[in-house]
Amino acid sequence: MTMDALKRQAAARALEYVEDGMRLGLGTGSTARHFVELLGERVRDGLKVVGVPTSEATRADAERCGVPLTTLDDLDRLDLTVDGADEIDPDLNLTKGGGGALLREKIVAAASDRMIVIADETKWVAGLGRFPLPIEVIPFGLAATRRAITEVFAKAGVSGELAVRKQPDGHAFVTDGGHWIFDAHLGQIPDASYLAGLLNPIPGVVEHGLFIGLARVAMLAGAEGIRIVERP
Ligand SMILES: O=C(CO)[C@H](O)[C@H](O)COP(=O)(O)O
């Protein structure tokens, strides 16, 4: 089975948790796109839901699939968010932001009663850090922000290259919020929760890709079928 087919299987399983009338957070990335497409099929069959997209890309996908949309300006709470991840550890802490949507993804996940993460089994890791950690920053004062991040890395016992994310044309990648992203190549993060707490207050850091305690359930698709892991 292809990786794409596995992602679609995980998305299909998450769809079983969607009920009529739900307010949904719609994640970003190739796995979340499968969920949006399958949700669109259910909407065409009469399911009544409303979604909040976590990126302009997901907004476009949802509109194409006929999923009714709203915003967190109009709603202050969601029932369920379904999103992908770049890494998932046994406590269901996540690394997210490979697609650059971490800020809206975290706002939407935090506003949801429940977050289900959908992925293929390759995203399951014993500990976070192999995937470069995205850190969304304000472009103003970049060198000072970089220095402050490096200092908290030392405090958290991690180190590695901190690279501004680039587009294929060499220009800086710009998020939907108009910010830049540092990708931190750390290799391993011994205490992701501690590092998250150190990164949060740095001026210039808008958000980072450590999602601690947000996901409640993970649906992991592999050759043997779907494995469902609930947060301990
Ligand atoms: O965090 C994300 C986007 O910001 C995605 O959920 C993450 O990158 C996983 O993407 P994919 O499903 O394409 O592997």
Image (spheres, rainbow, N blue to C red):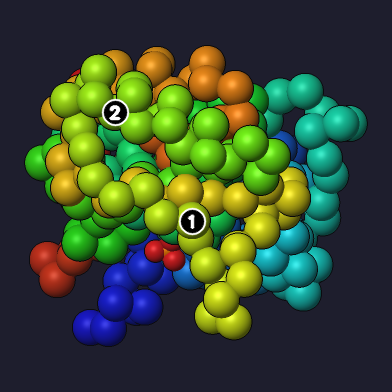
All told, the count of numbered labels is 2
Residue 57 visible in the displayed image? yes
Residue 97 visible in the displayed image? no
Q: Which residue is mark 1?
A: 164
Residue 194's place in the image compared with 31, above or below, is above
Q: Nearer the viewer, residue 7 or 185?
A: 185
Residue 102's place in the image compared with 99, above or below, is above
Q: Quadrant of the C terminus?
A: top left
- At 17% from the left and 25% from the top, the residue drawn is 157
Residue type (three-letter) at the residue carrying disc 2? Phe
The crowding category of the residue bearing disc 1, from other C-alpha atoms within 10 Å (few below 14, some 14 to 19, many at least 20), is many
The disc placed on residue 87 is none
Q: Quadrant of the N terminus?
A: bottom left
- At 34% from the left and 22% from the top, the residue drawn is 152
Q: Residue 222: which quarter of the image? A: bottom left
**Spatial separation of the CA atoms under disc 2 and disc 1:** 16 Å
Residue type (three-letter) at the residue carrying disc 1? Val
Q: Which residue is mark 2?
A: 153
